[in-house]
Amino acid sequence: MCQLVRKLDTLLGLASQNTDTFRRLASWLVGNRLRILMYHSVSNNSKDPHAVAPSRFEQQMLALAAKGHEVISLGEGLRRLQGRQSLRRYVVLTFDDAYRDFLTNALPVLERFGYPATLFVPTGLVGGTATWDSYDPTKPLMDWDELREVHRRGVTIASHTVTHARLTECDERQLEYELRASLDTLRVRLGDVFPALSYPGGFYGPRERLAARQAGYVCAVGVASRWGNGTETDPFALRREKPMEFSRATLWSRLGSRRNEVNGDCLL
Ligand SMILES: [Zn+2]
C-alpha cells in the first residue's frame, strides 16, 4: 500500500511539473487512449516467450469483440490521434518480424473477425529466419510471395528496418540505410505500403525519431507501455502493449508500467 501511495505521489508530482504528463494522466483516467497491441509469433513455440499460442490468440480476438472494442488500422488510428477525435475503445493490431506463422495462424483468425492489422517486415531477412532472436533464431519468416499474398488479403505492410538492427547503435550512414532502403524495397516489391516503422527491440531516441521522419515515415511504434496514446503522443514514439497484459490492465499494473516506460523496456 505504501508503495502504491509513493507511486501515486510520484505521478502527481510529475503531473504538476510536466504538461504532457498531466494531459496523459487526464486522458488515461477518462479512458480516451488509443491502444496498440504488439504481437510477434503466433505459434506454440515453447522457446519463445513472446509467442502467443494460436488458441490464445483466437480468445484474445474474441475478447476484443466481446468487450466492445473496435479494431482499426494503424493509419486510421493515426488519423484519429492527429484529428483529436475520440480514441476510446479503439484498438490497433500490429505484428513484428513477419513470421510465417502470421500467414498460417494469425491471418485466418483476423479475417474471420474482419480485423485490420499491420505487419512490420525486416526486408533484408525476408525468406530467412529470425537470426537476431536469442530465444529461437530458427523461426521462419515469410518470403516475398507470401508477403504479396498477405498484402493482397488486405494486411498493411510496413518497415521493421533492413537487418533488424538496434538503431541506437548504428552510425548515421547505417541508420539512414536501415530506414530508407527498407521502405524503398517494400515499395518496389509490394507497391502500396504504409510508411510506418517499428523500431527493432524498441530501441530509439530523439536521433532515431528525427531520422525516421526525415526518411519519409509518418509514424513509428515502440514497445511495452500500458499508457496507450493520446494527443500528447509523438507519432514517432507510439506506445504499444503486450497482448497478455491487455486483459488485466489494472490500476496497479498500469502504475507499474510507468517504471518500464521511463527506463526503456527491451523485448527482443
Ligand atoms: Zn522485431
Image (tube, rainbow, N blue to C red):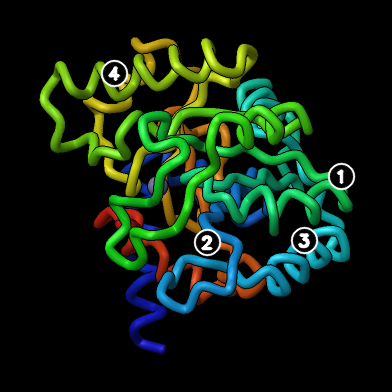
* Sequence-wise first label, 3 or 2: 3
x, y (%) of residue 76? Answer: 71, 28
Label 1 beta carbon within 8 A of ligand 1: no
x, y (%) of residue 163? Answer: 30, 35
How many residues crowd around disc 1 within 10 Å: few (fewer than 14), some, or many (20 or more)? few
Tell me how far mark 4 sits from mark 3, CA to CA. Answer: 34 Å
How many residues crowd around disc 2 within 10 Å: few (fewer than 14), some, or many (20 or more)? some
* Sequence-wise first label, 2 or 1: 1
* Sequence-wise first label, 4 or 3: 3
**Residue beneath the point at 62% across and 75% down:** 248
**Dot label at residue 114:** 1
Camera-side residue of 165 and 24: 165
Q: Which residue is mark 3?
A: 61
Secondary element at tag 4: helix
Which quadrant, please, contains the N terminus?
bottom left
Q: Which residue is mark 4?
A: 211
Total tally of numbered discs in the picture: 4
Secondary element at tag 1: loop
Give the quarter of the image for residue 262: bottom left
How many residues crowd around disc 3 within 10 Å: few (fewer than 14), some, or many (20 or more)? some
Amino acid type of disc 4? Ala
Q: Which residue is mark 2?
A: 242
Eye-nearest disc, 2 or 1? 1
**Contact? badges 4 and 3 (CB < 8 Å):** no
Residue 249 shows up from this direction: no
Secondary element at tag 3: helix
Amino acid type of disc 3? Met
